[in-house]
Amino acid sequence: MTHSATALYDIPGPVTRRRHRLYGIAATVLILAALGWLLYLLFDTDQFTAAKWSPFTYKGIQELLLRGLGNTLKAFAYAAVLSLALGAVLAVGRLSEHRPVRWLSTLLVEFFRAMPVLVMIFFIFVALKVQPLPALVAGLTLYNGSVLAEVFRTGINSVERGQREAAYALGLRKTQVTTYVLAPQAVRAMMPTIISQLVVALKDTSLGFLITYEEFLHAGKLIASNLDYDLPFIPVVMVISPIYIGMCMLLSWFANWVGGRQRRNPKTEAVGVAPAEPGTLLPGRQEPRV
Amino acid sequence: MLRTRNIAALLAGLLLAALAAGCGREGSPPVKGPKAGQLPHYTVDTGFRLPGSKTWTQAKRRGYLVVGAKEDQPYLGEKDPATGVYSGFDIEIARMMAASLGFEPKTIRFRTIASANRETALQNGQIDYYVGTYTINDKRKKLVGFAGPYYMAGQSLLVRTDENDIHGPQDLAGRTVCSAAGSTPYQRIAADYPRAKLVAYDTYSICVDNLLTYQVDAVTTDDAILLGFAAKAPKEMKVVGKPFSEEPYGIGVPHADDALRFALDDALEANEKNGNWRKAFEATLGLSGVPAPTPPPIDRYPAN
Amino acid sequence: MYVLTDNFSLYGKGFLGTLELTVYSSILALLLGFVMASFRVAPVGSLRVIGTVWVAVLRNTPLTLLFFAVLLGLPRFGLVLPFKVFAVLALGCYTSAFICEALRSGINTVPTGQGEAARSLGLSFGQTLGNVVLPQAFRSVIPPVGSTLIALAKNSAIAGAFSVTELLGTYKPLNELGYSIIWSFVWIAVGYLIITLSISALFNLMEKRWGVAR
């Protein structure tokens, strides 16, 4: 991050630099003190006892965690593939020339985006009495599929008009124009946004924990709430959160990397700037990936 | 951007290290509380036939039984996280029943089914029967069948050992009580002792965790469940007061399968007579210090 | 259908719970997000590191994991607080990372020339920030902050699973009482729509008033 281009301050001179260094040291000391205090608390409350950590040295426990991780990734894989498919279908629906199709797709997209994803998952799980995995995947698919539909639609709409006109001038039909000319360019340009949305899907697989799907967090809870192991809650959190956060960070980083590559790629030139997505809730801006 | 990338790389490295460390000790970590005693041996009734039961015929064709259970209730229905082996009184009842139905108890495949999903699991045929602190009541009888009861539990209270003010539900006014969301014990406290502050989770193990971290003052549910937890950490928790309800535990079977239900009733009766029931109790729940009670009379309600 | 009229107080409690969670968490998220955003644009290296780590970690943490860690983890350090406070803490911290990013990109939309012009007029750092950059940044961050707060309201549903009274959790007692599960969910959905649409309307109004004309 270069900060020479900020509107806030000039490139600091020697005195300011010295002052900044002083602030920096003060902030570092404060942070180190906070970390030290945290460490003291951890030791003080006996979080590093052998009884709490030794369960992790057993093969069975490791396998339990890995099985949980596998289930998380399985749910993510299903949700990712199905969301992309649903997103494509709904985007085509919203771009359709038939008014009822367009209205129906718009209604679905807007509804599923406005509902909390957990409400949908619980509805499918409790009211429709579906098994945990399909319920989780269905909920994630409906929500992320709807958001992706908007991403695809924006992408296709933001391909330069000349491309579409040239394609029609060559005598291609609407389907051909979309599949051969518009979609490939749009998908390439929207790739970072699509991957970022998949990060949301990956994070939200942990909602499966709340409907007894035996995913990573569930495996952690099973170990953490075991009285035989002295309730190793903090150790469990210390083991599973770096893995969760690491996975999401890798995917986020991949999205950024694709984005960076794209800005240097001539193939995406014909697509206008990506972030211009009219949602119903707040017109004119993109849905934040929260 | 560079910094984010560094963090990501670091975390990826940690993840790989964690995966590479995937070579660990065999067996399971040491267990607290009284050790499980000699479990009774159940003789398999190899000649048993029950052609009238769809569940039984399907299981026979499959070669093994699928039984639903709980996984986080010490001495009742508990799954060893390391080995995946289930143990406890409910599990022994399930094994006892399997032997009487002509299945080798070792071949049972246990599946953890949360309280909220029990009826669905039985209706969808995901499990052949369910043994896991399943209270018989009329509302549930409309959805599933119940063999038994095989045990009479009662609602009670679990508190920390340093707690001296709670002796029964009447002392709960203004105190925080934890129970399973939507469960019968939860509703009873809400209706009969409205001045208690209720807190709810999906499982009792989280309630017990909250009790030990002083987030709640008491955990309430059936005494059988609470005794198991107390036996695991007797220095920290105790069960107080007399049970203030009657919770007959039954074996859940698919609603239409009366043949299986009656067969299980017979099997229970036989095992109560030949001493297996008592031995199973003493080897599991009895370890918490309670003497084996007289099993409740079996309720053979007519087919509907 | 009757499930709403029969259980109005139950729904009301759940609705107010969600509303309370949303309001308090929003305040916390906005405050923390503002602090972290100023860290991220600060000229001091170590502050920037704090801001960057805060955002990178929280943005990539599943919210369920954060709830799990905060609600069941913090009491272990002798911190005994109502569940609602913990929920606000988890939700507020999580959302602050997204608010921070929205604010930072808002600050970045202010052209460098504006700051340069302010400084050449002799304004101090505080004056530049307070009188020139922030008012302009404020206008362009209204929509993204609004969307983030809507997401916060939706995310508050997770708190219900951690024994906090809120809207989604009302389905459980209703289910036990034997009401139609479909209808109880319909009213839950309506409740969430009321909250999210109100936030949306509020921010639309703010944008009309102060937003950048484009």
Image: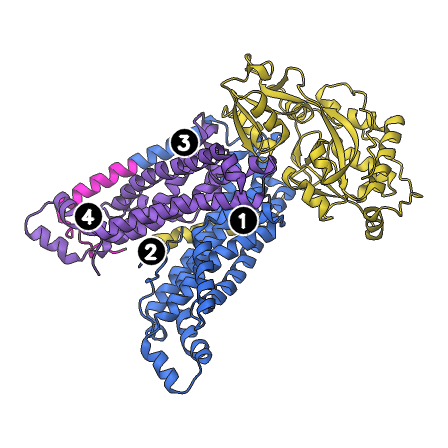
Chain colours: A blue, B yellow, C purple
**Label 2 belongs to which residue?**
B1
* Left or right of C31 on screen, residue C12: right
Residue B6 locus on image (x, y percent): 38, 53
- Count of picture labels: 4
**Label 1 belongs to which residue?**
A121
Task: State the residue at coordinates (35%, 50%).
Answer: C147
* Amino acid type of the residue tagged 2 in the rendering: Met
**Label 3 belongs to which residue?**
C85
Answer yes or no: do the residues labelled 4 and 3 have beta carbons within 8 Å?
Answer: no
B136 vs B234: above or below:
below
**Label 4 belongs to which residue?**
C134
Chain to which mark 1 belongs? A
Q: Which of the 4 quarters of the picture holds residue C16?
A: top left
- Judged from the image, the secondary structure of the residue bearing numbered disc 3 is helix
Question: Which label sits on residue A5?
Answer: none
Task: State the residue at coordinates (89%, 45%).
Answer: B50
Do pointers 1 and 2 mark residues of a single chain? no
Residue A217 visible in the current orientation: no
Cα–Cα span, label 1 and label 2: 35 Å
Cα–Cα span, label 2 and label 4: 24 Å
Chain to which mark 3 belongs? C
Q: Nearer the viewer, mark 2 or mark 3?
A: 3
Pick out the residue farthest to the bottom.
A170
Cα–Cα span, label 1 and label 4: 40 Å
B82, B174: nearer the viewer? B174
User: Few, some or many C-alpha atoms within 10 Å of disc 4 (few <14, some 14-19, many ≥20)?
Assistant: some
Do pointers 2 and 4 mark residues of a single chain? no
**Magenta span contains residue A8:** yes
* Amino acid type of the residue tagged 1 in the rendering: Ile
